[in-house]
Image: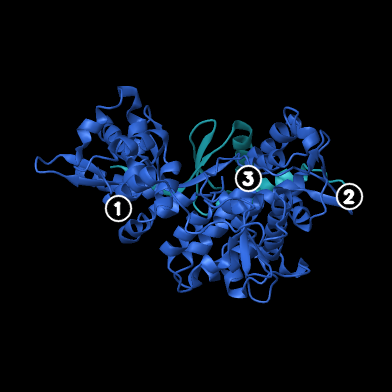
Amino acid sequence: MPEVRIIAKNFMDMVASMQAMKLDKLYENGFICEAILRSLPPLAKKYVIQMLHIDVPVAAKLLEEWVLPDGVSKHRVAIDRLVQLRVFLEAVDRKNEKTYKVNPTFQRSLQKLLVQGGTLPRESMPSNITVRLPTLENLEAYALEQWECFLLQLISPSQVEKPLNISSSLMKVFQRRILSHRDKEAPKLTESGFQFLLMDTNAQLWYIIREYISNSEERGVDAAELISFMLELSFHVIGEAYSINTLTDFQRNIINDLADLGLVKLQQGRKGSWFIPTKLATNLSMSLSDSSSRKQGFVVVETNFRVYAYSTSKLHCEILRLFSRVEYQLPNLIVGAITKESLYNAFENGITADQIVSFLQQNAHPRVAERVPSVPENVTDQQIRLWEADLNRVEMTEAHYYDEFPSRDVFEGACDCAREWNGLLWEDSKKMHMVVKTEAHHHVREFLRRQK
Amino acid sequence: MVNATKGVFISCDIPMAQYIINMNASMPASDKFIIHILDNTHMFVQPHVEQMIRSQIAKFREDNTYVKPN
């Protein structure tokens, strides 16, 4: 099975991977603390609230006593997460016992937020200045259109009629892992690029934002400031106008990039200009699994493997081309067929059957989306998955074959040694033969040498 | 004295194993690649034959596919 390289991690994983100093600085902002709190698993949330007003370190043993025996694994996950995010600081006390205490910066910010309530650094503008605000539907349509335009420019720049103003250097950053540039050849989608296209909008957004942030240091932009601005942005109200003048110079630069991605809409009136956050922006601090923002689907798959996509978008056509044979294209309809060949093409490019099936299910046309299953079973389970399984019928591993063991003890010892390194592939205890992965070979060799 | 041989470990289903055994049998003696047939679904073969086996299987699969002309 091909490895999935693009992991649609969420924002908080990125926050967790930041340096301790920067993280502490982030926690000075109450909104970030709230966003972090929201993202935590339920048990972790409870611990934070419970410990919020305790200033002294609490022994790890005491914490463990709070849960019943069968909750221990959840307890571990919660504590790990809290320590990762530096919400809990781990220490060892004089009796050499582990203790936890809430990060003082985080504690102060969250206490303040709970007692005083949070106010955004800027208020929405009164409606007498902002005359023609878009309706929510218009705004959503705008965001999706902008996003689609961005995606199309990302994967095939030649097909875009009016390119966005994203600087070409920034575009290259986004394309870095999605397109492969060989000399003098047209850029080709990489394996992760194919997977990227099949993800849903939220996951794609995460990926792009992640690239945007992880590259920020190279562009001379402070990642912590960037993250804090984005999280702040996610607390703004969709469809309300906020004045550009309330932004710092730094944020003003960022907001232009975000407008190109469809996270905000910029508008100019007679008295100043303003930005309007769209659904994409407010989704940033939500978890990925939240699928409330699913857009309307457009694909109908029939039991005869025909695919009808009611779409005018070139992007959709490109995506369908990844795994089906597009047969004809009408102004508002793309007709294709899922064939063995087209699927093998997709598998070769590193797309998995599950990704294709979930793409078809997530984008099912409303007419078929209500049905269970939305994509015929004979297409998904019996063919797409079967054809994939057919490709993986043979598994090969580089290995070493051992025989002629002098005694059963040595043979069993060697087996255990290989098992310990997770390298035992096959054994025959009667004939005393075994096969060991190459990675574990030298451990076993060492073991046998010591036996002599 | 324990003896170790370098090679590739293959794990597959029974028909596929038979296909590989048949492939091995049809080779001239100098090119035979199976070192040990371990059981119904496992075997141990010479190193460096991985690509050859994979391409043979892919060819076999293609021969059994009919594609509707465009």
Which quadrant: the N terminus of chain A?
top right
- Residue A95 horizontal side relative to residue A162, left or right: left
How much space separates mark 2 and mark 3, taking CA atoms? Answer: 26 Å
Q: Residues within 10 Å of mark 1 (few under 14, many from 20)?
A: some
Secondary structure beneath dot 3 equals loop
Q: Residues within 10 Å of mark 2 (few under 14, many from 20)?
A: few
Letter of the blue chain: A
- Residue A94 horizontal side relative to residue B47, left or right: left
B31 and A438: which is toward the camera: A438
Q: Which residue: 34% across, 59% down?
A: A25
> Which residue is the site of mark 3?
A352
A282 and A87: which is toward the camera: A282
Q: Which residue: 51% across, 38% down?
A: B43
Circle 2/circle 3 CB separation < 8 Å: no
Image coords of residue A161 (percent x, y): 78, 69
Secondary structure beneath dot 2 equals loop
- For the residues carrying marks 1 and 3, which lies nearer the camera in this image? 1
Name the amino acid, label 2.
Answer: Pro
- For the residues carrying marks 2 and 1, which lies nearer the camera in this image? 1
A329 and A295: which is toward the camera: A295
> Which residue is the site of mark 1?
A105
Q: Is residue B9 above or below residue A154?
A: above
Q: Answer yes or no: is residue B31 visible.
A: no
Name the amino acid, label 1.
Answer: Thr
Q: Answer yes or no: is residue A277 visible.
A: yes
Q: Which residue: 21% across, 43% down?
A: A55
Secondary structure beneath dot 1 equals helix
What chain letter is assigned to the residue under label 3?
Answer: A
